[in-house]
Amino acid sequence: MSRELRDPAVERAHFDAIVAARGPIYWADRTAAGARRREIRAELLAARAAVGAGGRVLEIGCAVGDYTAALAGRTAGLLVSVDVAPAAVALARTRLPARVAVATADVEHLPFADATFDAVLGNAVLHHLRLDRALPELLRVLRPGGRFCFSEPNLLNPHVFVEKTVPWVGRWLDDSPGETAFVRWRLARALAGAGLVDVAIRPFDFLYPAVPAALVPAVERLGRWLERVPGMREVAGSLLVTARKPAAGGARG
């Protein structure tokens, strides 16, 4: 059932309704800790995409542009950002620099030619998608050897587990009807099965969005230590997902 609810039409209706009601989408993006998390994720994704001047980066699931703005300041290449919800895209255009191209697009049917981008990336978006349909499209528009970089919710984190498995909690937090979260080894198998190579998924992020502003630096330092502790790191809030499309004529790995 949840797979059908991840249909792009369902996602579009959900997020258009939220934007119409209040504009910004997630409560977590409107706190001091949320802003710092946004900076950290943008730095990680941009560094692993490693796209220089003259390159092209596709961000999927840009929503109203919060993470897009952070990425734009850290990406030397042309940044193209898409989202399935027209209302979110319209708001994003008013908030982003003109050099960022923003468009409404369904990830299952992207309006780009084959091998257009040097990297595809996104924050908390893969768990909204039907991966069996979206991954082939993402690989199609990615050039051979191009990077695949995402930050996704970790189902082993207690908060994420409750949010994604208790329906009323998800509704209270404005989750879309079919969104889920990932266990990293299962996601790694799905990505490898789709044809990606050098798949690496690392748990990170113990900085909860509700942490008071004065405590953010201390909690961030503690979190970075916990990310190095075997066992404990597995319950971090997020997963840093990196992979690449095989080079032309290269092995799948």
Image (spheres, rainbow, N blue to C red):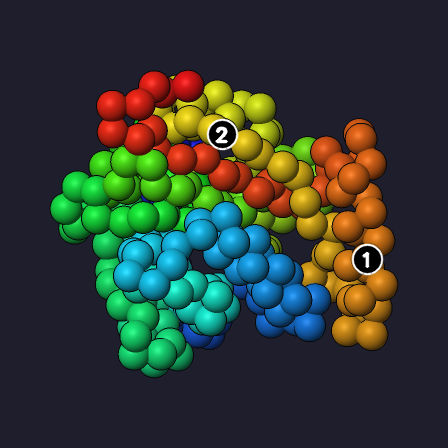
Does residue 44 sit above or below 87 in this rendering? above
Q: Give the x, y percent position of residue 51.
A: 39, 55
Circle 2 Cα neighbour tier, 10 Å, few/some/many (<14 / 14–19 / ≥20): some
**What amino acid type should be assigned to the residue bearing mark 1?**
Arg
What number is the disc on residue 11?
Answer: none
Q: Secondary structure at mark 2?
A: strand
Distance Cα–Cα, label 1 vs label 2: 27 Å
x, y percent for residue 126: 43, 42
* Residue 12 visible in rendering: no
Give amino acid for label 2.
Val
Q: Is residue 75 above or below residue 251?
A: below
Pick the front one: 21 or 203: 203
Q: Residue at x 31, y 23 (%)?
A: 250
Dot 1 falls on a residue whose secondary structure is helix
Q: Mark on residue 199?
A: 2
Closer to the chain start, of discs 1 and 2, is 2
The residue located at (41%, 19%) in the rendering is: 253
**Residue visible at 44% across and 49% down in the picture:** 49
Quarter of the image holding residue 19? Answer: bottom left
Q: Quadrant of the N terminus?
A: top left
**Rendered residue at 66%/71% (across/down):** 31
Q: Is residue 147 left or right of residue 7?
A: right
173 is higher (above) or lower (below) than 150: below
Whether residue 149 is visible to the viewer of this picture, yes or no, is yes
Q: Is residue 111 left or right of residue 153?
A: left
Q: Which residue is mark 1?
A: 221
